[in-house]
Amino acid sequence: MIRDLCDGQLDGGEIGSTEITFTPGKIKGGTHIADTKTAGSVCLLMQVAMPCVLFAASPSELRLKGGTNAEMAPQIDYTVLVFKPIIEKFNLTFDCDIKRRGYYPQGGGEVIVRMTPVKQLSPINLTERGTVTKIHGRAFVAGALPIKLAKDMASAAVRCIRKEIRDLYVNIQPVREPDNQAFGTGSGIIIVAETSTGCLFAGSSLGKRGKNSDRVGIEAAEMLLGNLRHGGAVDDYLQDQLIIFMALANGVSRVKSGPITLHTQTAIHFAEQLTKAKFTVTKSEDEDSTKDTYFIECQGMGMINSSL
């Protein structure tokens, strides 16, 4: 997909290859289609394409096919509810239209991402956590599964959150995906917490055969609570997704996070190799020493879109 959207040359891009050589050309807008043909994640395709099409000569439409709610990748709901509003703080906008949801193992989902290019990205400052003001989410079933599973996931998650956060109404909607908007059978849950300063945190989990639906709800709730406990301003899964944008932005970005994940360390390593951006990670010396928080700071390279 990246080769095609920038008229590049790619050698070694096949299964079993241990080395690739990629020579990019000029990034062009327009419509691009990428199909994993499996439950491979459309969200990961989007992560790869976004930094490129932001610097295209004209608007882009990405038609991405595969899994929308699959293991080992963000669920599309996370991308829309958490990633999108935060990433737009870099002074960009995009639109994500979920045409059809796809699950493991068949995939078959499709999302359309529309994006306008930018001249330059602004740096971000996400350092004030604020207080949690709202918790909401959706528990879903699709295909042959009964809505009762979604209701069980939702109520188990609510019970788990209530043990720790008593003063907030937790609104998790159980939904059955319409048959024409989902391919195959799947289930899962995503829960989002919003704070007074506009920070967003999530917890999510997927159902699978033999996995108790209460367990699915509790997993998501515990993930959310863990993300709220460390006192950072982003959750553990947003951390690494911000790095490339911080590297490309013009100026200094600062993000307060929980413990630095291996994904984030890897992203920083390659972002520094590929750009002139410089990252520093320091442990937060807060008034509350029980919290394990860090500041990720980046002097961005100030990438300029020469086509605009």
Image (cartoon, grey):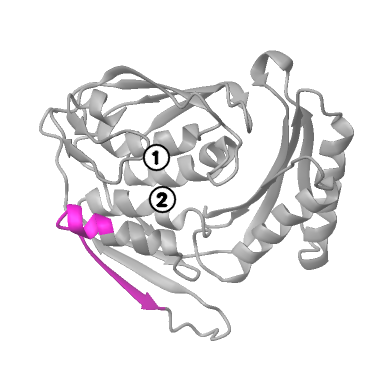
Q: Nearer the viewer, residue 107 or 149?
A: 107
Residue 169 shows in the view: no
Mark 2–mark 1 contact, CB under 8 Å?
yes
* Residue appearing at x 17%, y 53% in the figure: 275
Image: 223 above or below 296: above
In the current view of this chain or complex, which residue is farthest to the top? 180
On whether residue 282 falls in the magenta region, the answer is yes
- Real-space Cα separation, disc 2 to disc 1, in angstroms: 8 Å
Q: Nearer the viewer, residue 4 or 179?
A: 4
Mark number displayed over residue 47: 1
Task: Tell me where residue 59 appears, x and y as whole percent.
Answer: 28, 21
On whether residue 196 falls in the magenta region, the answer is no
Amino acid, disc 1:
Gln
Horizontally, residue 168 falls left or right of residue 115, namely right
Give the magenta-colored segment's residue range. 270-283
Q: In the figure, residue 172 lies in which quadrant?
A: top right
* Residue appearing at x 55%, y 70% in the figure: 231
